[in-house]
Amino acid sequence: MTPDMAGMTTSGGEAFLFWVLAPLMVLAALGLLFVRRAVHAALCIVFVMVSLAIMYIASSAPFLGVVQVVVYTGAVMMLFLFVLMLVGVDASDSLTETIRGQRWIGLLLGLGLAVVLIGVVSQAAFRPGTPLTEDQVANPVGLARVLFGDYVLAMETVGVLLVTAAMGALMLTHRRRLEPKRTQRYVAEQRVKALPEGGTLTPLPAPGVYAQTNAMDVPALGPDGRPLEHSVSRVLRIRGQEKAAPASLVETGPAGEVSTVRTGTDGGEDA
Amino acid sequence: MDITNYVVLACILFAIGATTVLLRRNAIVVFMGVELMLNATNLVFVTFARIHGDLTGQVLAFFVMVVAAAEVVVGLAIIVTIFRTRRSASVDDVNLLHG
């Protein structure tokens, strides 16, 4: 972290760090270009951002390194992952080209941009100034002096910007309620109204609780020992994935009644 | 090692980000490309602050981070709204100005 005296060259340790991190960062960034799933792209970007934070700390900007981790990987990328969760994790790209030749033109433009930028940087001669002093690097006081001294107006404006952005996000994602809210009172009244048509006042019984197993696909047994078909999820019933109640618990009595026995293995369930 | 290697790395990252914006269809991945470009510029700011021994570059990188955070919030809100109405996050599907 010590600023070197020559101004334009780095220490050996930092060079090692750079040559380890830089190829990995470029690979991860290329992953953004070639990976199919958006979640994998997000992970690639997280790797690039954490590596950038390490580089900031190495190149005498420890405060920015910490802010990079907190703001970018902590807040921004988590927001990305939240939105991916909302939109659907498996929303992968379509590979059909809507504009003909877009892929090759895009690649060509990107390569051209890289060549131009690197050409300019390698041709330019940088005039080394005075390196940052140890005191400037070690504590953020100098940074705060510039931030709240020279750029105080920009700082205030950025505050307004943040509030505006929060309000904008609230406005954009706000949904107007189209139907009346389902309150507890409404649900209770609907249940009472549905009583003549065979509805129940109580919630549906949970599956499997009174049976031998606790599985979702086994119907519960009522107090009379009959399996309660409607205790199994409707989806499982439609798919035909419902299992019969344990045979050992259900047996038809002599008078056609259903009774429960503990040991019988030949009982059929005919409820 | 020459310090300008950092700038070269930033150039490569910026170009990859720009290519991502040009090539990918998923709006969220396109947005990640924009973030990559912003990060690359931040690396340039930090490197030049080091070369010139001036903390202003670091302050500007800090501002870029704050503005990027605000931009992400609004952009992702727009993507969520578009997804709600059109059931798709592909930039190709948003070809009508109404709706």
Image (cartoon, coloured by chain):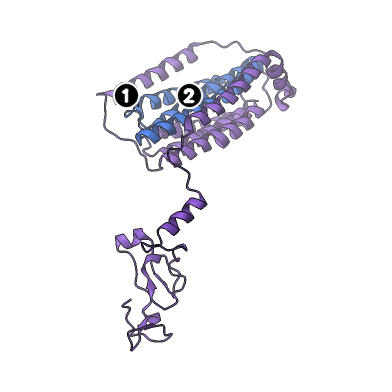
In the displayed orientation, state which residue is furthest to the bottom: A254
Give the chain coloured blue. Answer: B
In the displayed orientation, state which residue is furthest to the left: A100
Q: Chain of mark 1?
A: B
> Residue B47, located in which quarter of the rendered image?
top right
Q: Chain of mark 2?
A: B
* Residue B25, placed above or below residue A127: below
Instruction: Tell me residue A250's x, y (percent).
Output: 38, 80
Give the residue type that dot 2 points to: Met
Residue identifier under label 1 = B96
Whichever of callouts 2 and 1 sits on the residue coming sooner in the sequence is: 2
* Residue A187, placed above or below residue A46: below
Quarter of the image where the N terminus of chain B is located: top right
Establish whether labels 2 and 1 are both on one chain: yes
Checking the image for residue B37, the label placed there is 2
Residue A16 seen anywhere in this rendered image of the structure:
no
> Residue A13, located in which quarter of the rendered image?
top right
Instruction: Categorize mark 1 by other alpha carbons within 10 Å: few (<14), some (14-19), many (20+).
Output: few
Give the residue type that dot 1 points to: Leu
Residue located 62% across and 18% down the image:
A157
> Residue B31, located in which quarter of the rendered image?
top left
Quarter of the image where the C terminus of chain B is located: top left
Instruction: Categorize mark 2 by other alpha carbons within 10 Å: few (<14), some (14-19), many (20+).
Output: many
Instruction: Tell me residue B16's x, y (percent).
Output: 42, 26
Residue located 43% across and 38% down the image:
A178
Relative depth, front residue between A35 and A149: A149
